[in-house]
Image (tube, helix red, strand yellow):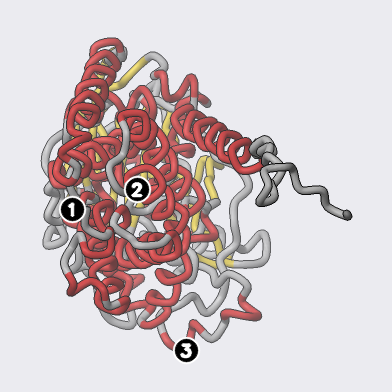
Amino acid sequence: MRRPDRAFGPWLVSPWRRGVVAALAGALPVFAFPAPSWWWFAYVALVPWILLARSAPTGRRAAYDGWLGGFGFLLAVHHWLLPSLHVFLVVIAALLGALWAPWGLLVRRFLAGVPSPGRVGAALLVLPSGWLLVELVRSWQGLGGPWGLLGSSQWQVEPALRLASVGGVWLLSFLVVAVNVAVAVLVSVRESRVPAVAGLVATAAATSVAWVWSPRPDVDGRVRIAVVQPGVVDGSASGDERFAREEALTRELAGRGADLVVWGESSVGFDLADRPDLAHRVAKLSQELGADILVNVDARRSDRPGIYKSSVLVGPHGPTGDRYDKMRLVPFGEYVPARSLLGWATSVGKAAGEDRRRGTEQVVMNVGHGLRIGPMICFETAFPDMGRHLAEDGADVLVAQSSTSTFQHGWAPGQHASLAALRAAETGRSMVHATLTGVSAVYGPGGERIGSWLGTDASGAVVYDVPLGRGVTPYVRFGNWPVQGALLVLAALCVTEGTRTFRPRRTAPERLVPPARTTRGSPARPGR
């Protein structure tokens, strides 16, 4: 049998060449996300990375393969941040890429050589569980949040969206990795193809059962929600000019029966208490339309110190008092973690010069017409738990206010808009994603697209007929159970490995050696 380090040929014997290949292999899944949106590619994108790690000659090399693959993955899915963070993005990707080092070790542990059917079966549970643990850790807001979760690449696949209502994006990630593991075994180990096929069949069967069993959201009526997207506004007076354009576009909605009008993130650059003239202009628009307007204020507050990003509801008589302050801020974009140590990032990129302040709780707003909305702001739509908690608190529709104008010509606007489909499917609630400069989109309670996107080249106001979903999805009821299951699998693995490591070894019984004999055939007598 060939040495494992020769499986890809002698060219990969060089650690440097192998490291480059690992980084490139880790970057492949990026094509499953928007803009390319090759969702089908996600089911084989990890195969080269898995094959590389299983062929590692040592455990240390497998850990390096995992680390460098993670570096490539993070750099690829966040490549649109390069103009803002520059070399700092490379540093972050290198640090967080280390989260995949144990995953590389697990790949080698279960798939190296000719794995037995038992090892293949275990790999189909352990490796997806290990991947979920990595996604869970890096989803912490201080480490960048859950951008680029592998399961989110399936945002436009109807069966996958049905599964998201059962186990959230976590269940989708688990299944995608499991399929990749089975395919990797199929193409690399002839002797293990039967258990690999059995694993694929079992995965397909479990997926089908969950798809058939998962309840479809009940639709109980519709509401008309308008999205106002002003488009790109440049110049020193951009704040006032943007407000004027939003005002003009909103006025065009008169007579179209909107129940709610949504403006994008940072649509108002002044605190409304400090600028009663602006509050009066928005209130007048609300009076003309007969609908409340949800604006987003990015400004220093007059009633407390610091800058906040806030969703503020304005009615015919001015601000209604319903306000949500953004809780999860973008690292470096809206605050600098450990600024005393990392403040130098402001000199090499577009990091925040002053930290924004955080809100303390989520808010469900009553906008009239029997409609309750759950607002989120920009980056927060990447967090599955935020939509889930709003649905638990009684929101009829989820609303996101966003702005990705800094990354206008990259993949970020489309990828950001796609996340709303998953949050809608997870919660069984329609979701409105309103932006300043695109992409704006609306999704129904099953994650299906409602109407057309407002792209990054659009400026306008569009009214959507939004279905109201009722009932409680399994994901809202049971939460992140796939993650909890993955943790149990890994805990069981640790116990098994620990038991094997510390099990006392049996010592061979002492062999009885017959006494040596002299030349005369009598037993030798030591000491005489």
Q: Nearer the viewer, residue 384 or 297?
A: 384
Q: Nearer the viewer, residue 192 or 277?
A: 192
Q: Residue at x 23, y 45 (%)?
A: 153
In space, the residues marked 3 and 1 are separated at their CA atoms by 31 Å
Q: Which residue is mark 1?
A: 34
Q: Residue at x 21, y 44 (%)?
A: 184
Q: Nearer the viewer, residue 80 or 122?
A: 122
**Quick one: label 3, few (<14), some, or many (20+) residues within 10 Å?**
few
Return the disc, 1 or 2, that comes first in the chain's sequence: 1
Q: Residue at x 37, y 53 (%)?
A: 147
**Quick one: label 2, few (<14), some, or many (20+) residues within 10 Å?**
many
Q: Quadrant of residue 83?
A: bottom left
Q: Which residue is mark 3?
A: 347
Q: Is residue 297 visible?
A: no
Q: Secondary structure at mark 3?
A: helix
Q: Nearer the viewer, residue 326 or 256?
A: 326
Q: Which residue is mark 2?
A: 149
- The kind of residue on which mark 3 rests is Ser
Which corner quadrant holds the C terminus? bottom right
- The kind of residue on which mark 1 rests is Pro
Q: Are marks 1 and 2 in contact (CB under 8 Å)?
A: no
- The kind of residue on which mark 2 rests is Leu
Q: Position of residue 440 (x, y in %)?
A: 22, 49
Q: Position of residue 174 (x, y in %)?
A: 34, 36
